[in-house]
Image: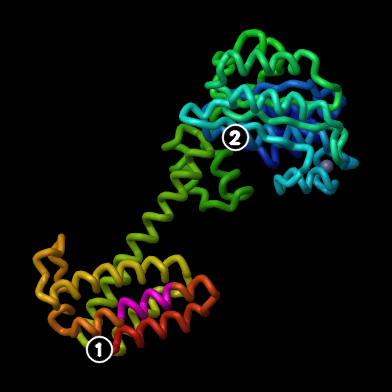
Amino acid sequence: MLSGADLSPTARRIAREFCGNAAAVASLGGMIETGRLPHAFIIEGADGLGKSSFARLIARGAMCGCREPLSGECGHCRKLRENIHPDLIYIQGSGKTNAIPIDAIRAMRKDALIAPNEAGKRVFILEDCDNMLPAAQNAFLKIFEEAPPHVVFIITCRSAMNLLTTIRSRGRIITLHPVEAEEGADFIADVMNAADRQSARNALAESGGNIGEALRLLGSESASQTAEQANSIADGILEAMCSGSELDLAVNCAAIGKDRAMGGAVCAILCERLRCGLMTAVGAGDTVDSADRQALRLGALLSPENVIRQIDEINQLSEMLRINISMPLFNTKLAIILQRRK
Ligand SMILES: [Zn+2]
C-alpha cells in the first residue's frame, strides 16, 4: 500500500483534500504532473465515498494554472473550490429514477463544442449515471468517442458495471474505497473540522469507513443532542414558571447560553407545552395527547389570555434570532415574557 511518503508532490496536495484512496490519489497526481490527463473518467463507488469531490479535483487538475499544480493560488483553483467556475458544467438526472435524460445529453453535445470561457479545458461532470437509459448512453457515446480536445468528461456512478461496455471501455475507471478509521478520523477532525477525533472514529466505525455517511451520522448526532438538551432546558424553565420564582426562571433561561439554534429549539418546545397548558385552562385538557404534568399545572395557574400572549411573544422573540439579537438579551427577554401573570 502507498504511504504519504511515496506520493509525488502533486499527489500529496491532493491527499490533503481527499482522504485515503492512495492509489487513486497517486494516479491522479501522476497524470496531472506529466500533463497526461485522459479526456474521460469514470468514478465509481458507493454514495458518501467522495465521487463528487474527486471529480472536482480532476477538474482542478485539468484547469489549474498554479506554478505548482493544485497549490491553490490560481483563479481556477479558487473558483473550482467555490464551485463557481464557468467551465465546470454539471449534468444531472431528473425524474423518479434520477436518470440523465437523452435531451440533456443532446444539449450537452452542442455545449461541448463551445470553447472554454476562462480555462484551457471545459469539464463536464455527469452525475450518478447508474440509471442512464441505453438510448441516452448511446447518444453520449457519439461525443465521448470523438471528444473535442478542450473537453474532459467525468462520469460518476455506484458501479461502472451499470454502464454500457462501449462507454466503460473508453473511460479511465477510478474506484473509490472506504477509508481506515484512523486516517478518516484525522481527516474529519482536522480538515473538515467537523467533530472531535473520538466521535469521528465512532461514526467511521459505524459507517464502515464511509466519510460521507460518517458526517451524516455526526450531523444527526449533534441534532439529537441539541434536541435532548433543549428539552431539559425547557423542563427547567417550566418548573420555574410553576414555582413562581423569578430568580429560578432567569437562571433557567440563561442556561440557553449563546447557542442560537438552542434558543430556537427551546422556544418551539415552550410554545408546544404552553399550548397543552392552554388546552387545560380552557377545559379541553382531555384533548392533550400526553399528560404533561408541568403544562397541566400551568394551565391551572395562568389565564388563557395570559398563555396566548406568552405564546405569541415567544414566537416574535424566536423570529428575532434571525436578525441577530444578542443571546444574553434574548435570554433575558424570554424570562420577562414568561414571568408575566396577566
Ligand atoms: Zn491552481
Q: Which amino acid, mark 1?
A: Ser
Residue 331 higher or lower than 66, as above or below: below
Q: Tag 2 or tag 1, which sits nearer the N-term?
A: 2
Q: In which quarter of the image is residue 152?
A: top right
Residue in the foreground of this view, choosing between 170 and 22: 170
Left/right of residue 92 with respect to residue 268 in the rendered view? right
Q: Badge 1 local density, few (<14 within 10 Å), some, or many (20+)?
A: few
- Labels 1 & 2 near each other (Cβ < 8 A): no
The reply to whether the residue tagged 1 has its Cβ within 8 angstroms of ligand 1 is no
Where is residue 164? Give x, y as percent.
Answer: 60, 11
Pointer 2: what residue? Answer: 50
Residue 158 lies in the magenta stretch: no
Q: In which quarter of the image is residue 244?
A: bottom left
| Quadrant the C terminus occupies | bottom left
Residue in the foreground of this view, choosing between 162 and 185: 162
Left/right of residue 24 with respect to residue 247 in the rendered view? right
- The residue sitting at 33% across, 60% down in the picture is 228
| Quadrant the N terminus occupies | top right
SS class, disc 1: loop
How many numbered discs sit on the rendered protein?
A: 2
Pointer 1: what residue? Answer: 245
Ligand 1 quadrant assignment: top right
Residue 316 lies in the magenta stretch: yes
What main secondary structure does the magenta stretch of the protein show?
A: helix
Where is residue 51? Give x, y as percent.
Answer: 61, 31
Instruction: Tell me the number on the disc at residue 284.
Output: none
Residue 199 higher or lower than 172, as above or below: below
For the record, the magenta segment spans 310-318
Q: Which amino acid, mark 2?
A: Gly
- The residue sitting at 84% across, 38% down in the picture is 64
Q: Quadrant of residue 81?
A: top right
